[in-house]
Amino acid sequence: MSEHAKVPADEETTDDQAADGDQTPVTTGAQSVVRALENAGAEYIFGVQGGAIMPVYDALYDSDELKHVTMAHEQGASHAADAYGIVSGNPGVCFATSGPGATNLVTGIADANMDSDPMIALTGQVPTEFVGNDAFQETDTVGITQPVTKESYFAADSDTVGDNVGEAFALADAGRQGPTLVDLPKDVTQGETDVEPAAPKTPDTYEVQEEADDEAVQEAAEALAAADRPVILSGGGVIKADASPALREFAIEYEIPVITTMPGIGSFPEDHELSLEWAGMHGTGYANMAISNTDCLLAIGTRFDDRLTGGVDSFAPDAEVIHVDIDPAEISKNIYADYPLVGDARQVLRQLFDAMPRAPDADEWREQCQTWKSEYPMTYDTPDDEPLKPQYVVEKFSDVTPDDTIVCTGVGQHQMWASQFWEYTEPRTWVSSHGLGTMGYGVPAAIGAKLAAPDQEVVCFDGDGSFLMTVQGLSVAVREQLDITYVVLNNEAVGMVRQWQDGFYEGRRMASEYPWIPQFDKLAEAFGARGFRLEAQEDVEETIEAAREYDGPSVIDAHIDPGENVFPMVPSGGDNGLFALEEDHLEML
């Protein structure tokens, strides 16, 4: 399936190969780079060829373990690697050449950094002697990427370049996951070496606190047990730490309602009675009411970003906050932690489980949370005389697909509908861009997600504006014969921008409407995918069935109500307990 050329194996192996597990000896820096990736257990590489990275690609030609997927744009390579890391839990790998190749990766690297996704980028660089001379396709890749990586390395020597790559791979996966980069000058990768790279390991100076202080855990457990209105806030760090089973066990044992952040979607099953789904700007009304009225908030693996908190002063105003995070820099950065617990989410949850003196006496609180669910249900109107509703499309997909279906999205209104009206019950099934909010993320992310989990169904919801930014990725999905269903919720606008213009800029729609977009179903056919046009509610189920039955990438161009907006909505910087359920409510907030 994946593009992976290699030299036919010889009938006889050399003594050196036999002595080293049938591996040919490393003779160049490029071969050391490839060996380091093999040693780290990498599987797929998403990349685009080019002059400065060519020696590494030449070495990759001989690898039996690494599969390369040529992407249609370097940004797509970084998003595919990012999504591969989200779904697999292991660092995704992307390649690009120097100059524009490297700079095209930057958006995806920054995206992975904001969302703490494990990824390693390897970029070609001009020969060392030309660095700083404005050579052809030269740019200061390390200088550009240092602010948005855990570490960016400049490989200076053929003997150590493999160790640079191994360390970068290990660092991307350690502690709070994130992206790393190694810049590879062409003379370093072409240079001779006989040094085998060491096993991947983090720098000696890198330390991660796995367990929280026992005394602090005990104090936090007693505060939680004494609470009348306790809530668990489960963030993306719960999923990254593979702590979802521990979270479920803890919440169910002590009967504490669970809210997730948007990156934490799937960490707790939304069909469980304790689930209040996700909170924040477009979160459920009942989740935001619970956050606004809790007296003890156990927050796990979240950085309390502004889209979650709204106004910091009005966020959980009556709550004692227990904050569990593996990164001490996040503790009390945005929201003050009364009980700071630094450590791995899974281990700290086990510590808390053992330290809890009793379950909170919170029967009335749980009843109140259920009342809020009844008062602020996630509903929408479907009049016969109005266009197709996007929420209906998402719900119908959710109804007919398996629980472990992976949902990828771009960024915009479609992203919110996909998170609001799909029922998530498993971790690593929600793949989206949160902190950076990168339009165009969906198409290549679905490619990375499918290769990370080939036996799981992948559905990508996109908007027409977001889809246009990376639509060339369809050629990759077709070439690799990936069974992905793309659903374009098409309202001929950058919908979220249009919604804000209507709500906060007196309806002055400047540069937000897209009346000139192509027919995406026909565009899909031109790429070699299967295209469907969907306009009526009565055709939704039949179209979904046909798209899912097609063995390969398909695109549903779903023409939705252009006036439909995303609600609930907390205005930026607002009080989470004061949310709008329709546009008229915004004027009162």
Image (cartoon, helix red, strand yellow):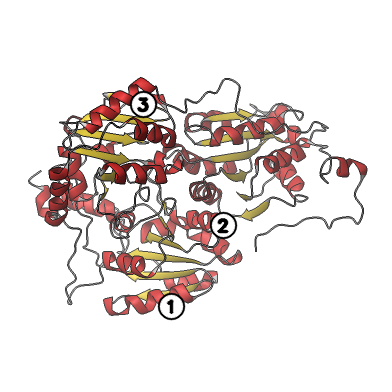
View extreme (left): residue: 588
Q: Which residue is mark 1?
A: 546
Kind of residue sitting beneath label 3: Leu
Residue that appears at 64% across and 43% down: 97
Q: Earlier in the sequence, mark 1 or mark 2?
A: 2
Kind of residue sitting beneath label 2: Leu
The answer to whether residue 66 is above or below residue 352 is: below
Compare residues 412 and 465 and report the one nearer the observer. Answer: 412
Q: Residues within 10 Å of mark 1 (few under 14, many from 20)?
A: few
Kind of residue sitting beneath label 1: Ala
Quarter in which the C terminus is drawn: top left
Picture coordinates of residue 82, whole percent (x, y): 51, 46
Q: Which mark is residue 341?
A: 3
Q: Is residue 79 visible?
A: yes
Q: Earlier in the sequence, mark 3 or mark 1?
A: 3
Name the image quarter holding residue 204.
top right
Quarter in which the N terminus is drawn: bottom right
Q: Is residue 172 left or right of residue 585?
A: right
Q: Is residue 8 left or right of residue 142?
A: right
Q: CA distance from mark 3 to mark 1?
A: 50 Å
Q: Which mark is residue 451?
A: 2
Picture coordinates of residue 377, whole percent (x, y): 17, 57
Residue that appears at 65% across and 40% down: 40
Q: CA distance from mark 3 to mark 2?
A: 36 Å
